[in-house]
Amino acid sequence: GENVEQHPSTLSVQEGDSAVIKCTYSDSASNYFPWYKQELGKRPQLIIDIRSNVGEKKDQRIAVTLNKTAKHFSLHITETQPEDSAVYFCAASDNTDKLIFGTGTRLQVFP
Amino acid sequence: GAVVSQHPSWVICKSGTSVKIECRSLDFQATTMFWYRQFPKQSLMLMATSNEGSKATYEQGVEKDKFLINHASLTLSTLTVTSAHPEDSSFYICSARGQAGYNEQFFGPGTRLTVL
């Protein structure tokens, strides 16, 4: 089955700096890669996703890149703000639509 | 956007009792729903996939007789934790997927279960 690894587990940045979170997956059949932001006690919120036929996608300060050959994808947050502080999860899904989540990254943005 | 609700939002029960959690898609029909469990400071772990009108598919290591899933309609799936024990205490989150072929899942707000 699919296995998703995520690094780093914690990330601290100064406000205004960029943050990068990386994930690798094992199943070459996976074709959908969403990123979620989860605040304490809340549901995961989809912040951006990418499909396997696209290499990069950007939405304002957030971007995701996908390297299918290497089986890794990354989340890039630019101009970080304190409200970006949360736990971020990557996930991978194949045609069964099952989402397999990474282990999570706790991002802290210091003012 | 698509809205998914869960009820209750939290529940405390005694060891040995059963607890039912409801997951509803409010403004769309969900052909497939998923149930996840999340322990503190850990990731979401998929427990089972629930398809309307058929038996749920459980992930390896998840006891189907302990976690009963029923998806009786296109807008409702239920998870019943039978004979709950303290180690079942967790945050249970459901998600719903609408039309087949569209990967995006819409998450419920979660149910925090505490078993005393």
Image: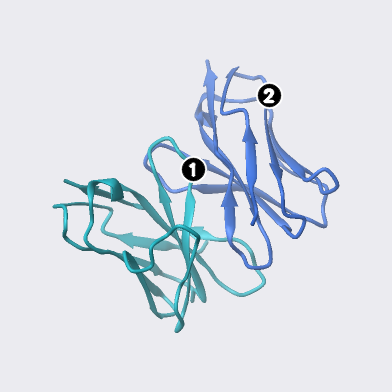
Which residue has dot 2 on it?
A: A18
Give the x, y percent position of residue B35.
44, 61
**The residue tagged with tag 1: helix, strand or loop?**
loop
Where does the N terminus of chain A fall, quadrant-wise?
bottom right
Q: Amino acid at mark 1?
A: Ser
Q: Classify 10 Å Cα crowding around label 1: few (below 14), some (14-19), many (20 and above).
A: many
Mark 2 or 1, closer to the camera: 1
Residue B107 located left or right of residue A90 = left
Category of crowding for the residue at label 2, using alpha-carbon neighbours closer than 10 angstroms: few (below 14), some (14–19), many (at least 20): some
Helix, strand or loop at label 2? It is loop
Res B53 → quadrant: bottom left
- How many labels, in total? 2
- Which of the chains is blue? A
The chain assigned the colour cyan in the figure is B
Q: Residue at x 16, y 60 (%)?
A: B17
Residue indicated by mark 1: B43
Q: Amino acid at mark 2?
A: Ser
- Residue A48's label in the rendered image is none
Residue A53 % position (x, y): 82, 57
